Image (cartoon, rainbow, N blue to C red):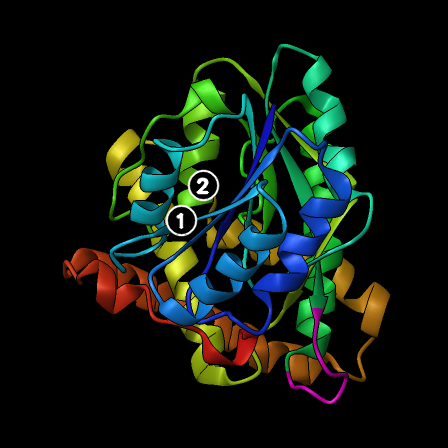
Amino acid sequence: MYSALITAYREEKTVGRVIESFLKELPKNSEIFVVAPDDETLKVAREYSKKSRRVKFLKDRGKGKPSALNLAFSKVSGKIIILTDGDVVIEEGSVRNLLKHFKDKKVGIVSGRVVYLIPEKSIFYEWAKLSERVFDKMRKEQDRKGEFWHPTGYLYALRRNLVERIPSNSLSDDAVIGYLVKSKGYLVRYEPRAVVYVKFPLTIRDFIKQKSRTRAGFLQLRRWFGFFGRRISSEISLGFRDLFKIYGFKKFYKMVFVGLIYLISWIRAYWLIYRGASFKKIWERVESTK
């Protein structure tokens, strides 16, 4: 049995299409959980539950995604959980491509591939498409070597018995779950044919909020487990090698500008973590991705 787990907040306009994706791809004996704190999103889930017994919903306390995940982990029945958000677009066939890897008992997690949705006129367009390409390339290489550990929280599948709970103040819940599964000796696989479309931040403020939150999550891993998951130097070197190949010198100035904003995101992450900022302060909603 499989369980789909959709975490959402104020995503009543988009959660329906995610539910539809799972209804199409999962077997009839599967369950689809929508977990949200707001009545508007839950109303959509409730309407779907009237049409299909597979669709269920849970109201969380609005304490953040990690707490919502912990609530759902205690309720789902499936041996494999597919996790995603309520504001993404899942390409047809992606869920099946994730699940086929679990025939191998050594596999604990399978991650999908992120494709960013962003207008070409956006200042972040080249950066988004570069990072999309670079991280796909990096994950394929890590997967080949058995070194891949960090699934994308936008779409991944997890063997249920490997994670019971995560810290409720986790800033990068997917990174924490990936680390915990990898540390138990299980494989974390990358499936590039499991495609999930995600809106990229459109404003400088939202870009900094999103990136600093994720990077603060990596700093938590270092504090909690002594695990150095990702460094800014490695991200810059990976991107710089492909920069000229894709865009040449013409748009180099633009990439440098965005790169400086990215550096600010890292600095902000360090500042927030080391001054002990609250979970609520760091986990701010990124409105332009909704």
Tell me where residue 169 appears, x and y as whole percent: 25, 48
Figure quadrant of residue 123: bottom right
The C terminus lies in quadrant: bottom right
At horizontal 32% and vertical 68% (from top left) the residue drawn is 268
Q: CA distance from mark 1 to mark 2?
A: 5 Å
Question: Is residue 228 among what the camera can see?
Answer: no
Magenta extent: 117-123
At horizontal 78% and vertical 53% (from top left) the residue drawn is 91
Please state if 259 lies on the left or on the right of 173 as rendered.
right
Comparing 226 with 163, the one in front is 163
Q: How many neighbours does mark 1 have within 10 angstroms: few (below 14), some (14-19), or many (20 or more)?
A: many
The N terminus lies in quadrant: top right
Q: Which residue position holds label 2?
A: 175
Question: Is residue 275 among what the camera can see?
Answer: yes
Please give the label number shown on residue 118.
none
Comparing 134 with 280, the one in front is 280
Q: How many neighbours does mark 2 have within 10 angstroms: few (below 14), some (14-19), or many (20 or more)?
A: many
The secondary structure that most of the magenta stretch takes on is loop
At horizontal 32% and vertical 64% (from top left) the residue drawn is 283
Comparing 8 with 194, the one in front is 8
Figure quadrant of residue 110: top right
Q: Which residue position holds label 1?
A: 172
219 drawn magenta: no
Tell me where residue 229 appears, x and y as whole percent: 45, 39
